Image (cartoon, grey):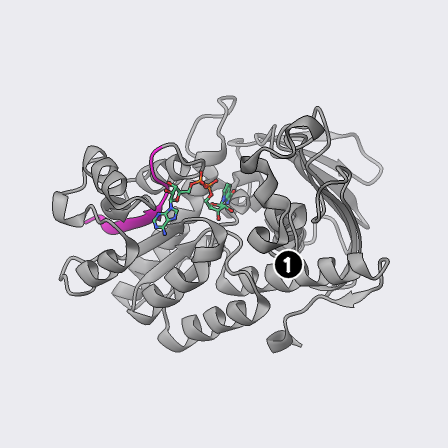
């Protein structure tokens, strides 16, 4: 099996998310890291790329140079990851899709709903893959939750409760630190801060696991630290396409919370609870029975869970391995296209541009509802209404 060629934009030295992508893409030997424009400073990007093993003419100074350099090569990259700051995602993703590359874009995919619709339309028109890195959907037990819901173990899903609450921006004395301040400044962050940054992961997870879309929502958004214009805490009620009632809490002032992504699903026949900080256990409470702990890697799980676990039961698997599962899905999707065959359905689970667009519509709906005292707002993108 020859490896697929992979390139990366952003994710330079010291970046938060770059290493998790490099670990994830490299883990199964599916992708070879061959090209990159890793930093907003051209020389730093070239230098770091070379230190990571890129040949000098593929350690690019910026993404336009990379686009020009790669488009003419016979061994051009099969997949490009965009891991730059949010406001650059749209333009970079659009240009690489137009040039015929498959793209994995970091979240949020775009800054506006209109841009999101453009990316969805472009991906459909070009027939290229445009995935969005809702990487937490790659966890093996999240895949298993989805499979349990789909095969009816819980019956009809009544309620879903999603949280992504941390306490890392809770220090009022540090709120003016430029590294924190920009996130709550509409000129730099857009219409939403905490919901757009973290809430959309929880919302995507609710949709991913239930297999339902968010249709309308009502939001209570607040800035607990008063100098902030954008919200640092939000409580969002929503309704889903299959009739499920949704509740979501996201916060950046929840002192004592670290990552805080948690999902609970309650159906007619049982309830599930999974937390990102203990991702190797899934709590399953069948109606009228005892609480059961499902362990990642145990026998008898769904094919979706079996396919996405690598390390023996009892040994922790974490976030870069969840990202690796998104890359594993994408490798299968790219290979299936190259070989002209259908892809393995248990791998066809990577988050799409459509998910990125739905998140963006939800971000704008939360902002609008928050300003209108919690008024219920249609959360669907116009093109999906
Ligand atoms: P960061 O600020 O730590 O790193 C950004 C990197 O991109 C830096 O190396 C910078 O030099 C480089 N860069 C900036 N502009 C560039 C350009 N025009 N061309 C090439 N490189 C450029 O940011 P962080 O935290 O790594 O976030 C990056 C993206 O990843 C954001 O969109 C963020 O929302 C997303 N993210 C996603 C997570 C997830 O769980 N899916 C978790 C954390 C971040």
Residue 8 in percent (x, y) is at: 31, 48
Q: Is residue 362 left or right of residue 247?
A: left
From the top left corner, tell me how far across and down residue 96 is, in percent: 33, 64
Taking the spot 39% from the left edge, 52% from the top edge, the residue there is 82
Of 113 and 28, the residue lying toward us: 113
Q: Position of residue 97 (x, y in %)?
A: 35, 67
Report if residue 383 is visible in the image.
Answer: yes
Q: Quadrant of residue 66?
A: bottom left
Q: Quadrant of residue 142?
A: top right
- Secondary structure found at label 1: loop
Could you say which is closer to the camera, residue 132 or residue 36?
36
The mark total stands at: 1
Q: Residue furthest top?
A: 314
* Residue at (78, 38) in percent of width and height: 224
The answer to whether residue 148 is left or right of residue 337 is right
Q: Is residue 151 in view from this perspective?
A: no
Residue 290 vertical position relative to residue 33 in the rendered view, above or below = above
Is 91 drawn above or below residue 12 in the view shown? below
Q: Nearer the viewer, residue 228 or 287?
A: 228
Q: Quadrant of the C terminus?
A: bottom right
Asked whether 11 or 275 is in front, the reply is 11
Q: Is residue 37 left or right of residue 112?
A: left
Which region shows up in magenta? 2-13
Image region (quadrant) for ligand 1: top left
- Asked whether 199 falls inside the magenta stretch, the response is no
Which residue is at 61% across, 28% downward?
Answer: 278
Q: Disc 1 marks which residue? A: 211
Q: Position of residue 198 (x, y in %)?
A: 62, 44
């Amino acid at each position: 099996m020859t490896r697929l060629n992979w390139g990366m934009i952003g994710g330079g030295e010291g970046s938060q998310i770059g290493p998790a992508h490099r670990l994830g893409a490299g883990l199964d030997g599916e992708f070879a890291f061959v090209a990159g424009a890793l930093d907003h400073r051209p020389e730093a990007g070239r230098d770091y790329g070379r230190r990571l093993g890129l040949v000098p003419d593929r350690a690019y100074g910026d993404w336009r140079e990379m686009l020009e350099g790669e488009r003419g090569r016979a061994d051009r990259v099969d997949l490009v990851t965009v891991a730059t700051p949010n406001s650059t995602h749209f333009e970079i993703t659009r240009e690489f899709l137009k040039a015929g590359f498959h793209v994995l874009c970091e979240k949020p995919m775009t800054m506006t709903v209109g841009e999101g619709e453009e990316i969805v339309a472009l991906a459909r028109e070009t027939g290229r893959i445009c995935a969005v890195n809702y990487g937490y959907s790659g966890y093996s037990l999240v895949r298993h939750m989805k499979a349990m819901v789909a095969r009816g173990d819980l019956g009809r899903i009544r309620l879903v409760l999603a949280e992504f609450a941390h306490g890392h921006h809770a220090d009022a004395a540090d709120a003016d630190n430029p590294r924190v301040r920009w996130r709550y400044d509409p000129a730099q962050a857009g219409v939403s801060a905490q919901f757009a940054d973290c809430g959309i992961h929880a919302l995507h997870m609710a949709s991913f696991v239930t297999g339902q879309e968010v249709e309308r929502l009502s939001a209570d958004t607040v800035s607990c630290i008063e100098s902030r214009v954008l919200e640092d805490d939000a409580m969002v009620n929503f309704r889903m396409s299959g009739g499920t009632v949704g509740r979501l809490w996201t916060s950046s002032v929840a002192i004592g919370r670290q990552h805080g992504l948690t999902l609970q699903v309650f159906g007619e026949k049982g309830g599930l609870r999974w937390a990102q900080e203990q991702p190797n256990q899934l709590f399953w409470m069948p109606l009228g029975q005892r609480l059961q702990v499902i362990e990642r890697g145990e026998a008898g799980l769904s094919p979706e869970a079996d396919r996405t676990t690598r390390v023996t039961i009892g040994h922790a698997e974490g976030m870069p391995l969840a990202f690796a599962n998104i890359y594993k899905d994408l490798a299968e999707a790219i290979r299936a296209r190259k070989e002209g065959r259908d892809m393995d359905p248990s791998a066809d689970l990577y988050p799409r541009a459509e998910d990125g667009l739905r998140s963006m519509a939800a971000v704008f709906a939360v902002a609008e509802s928050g300003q209108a005292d919690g008024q219920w707002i249609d959360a669907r993108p116009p093109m999906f209404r």
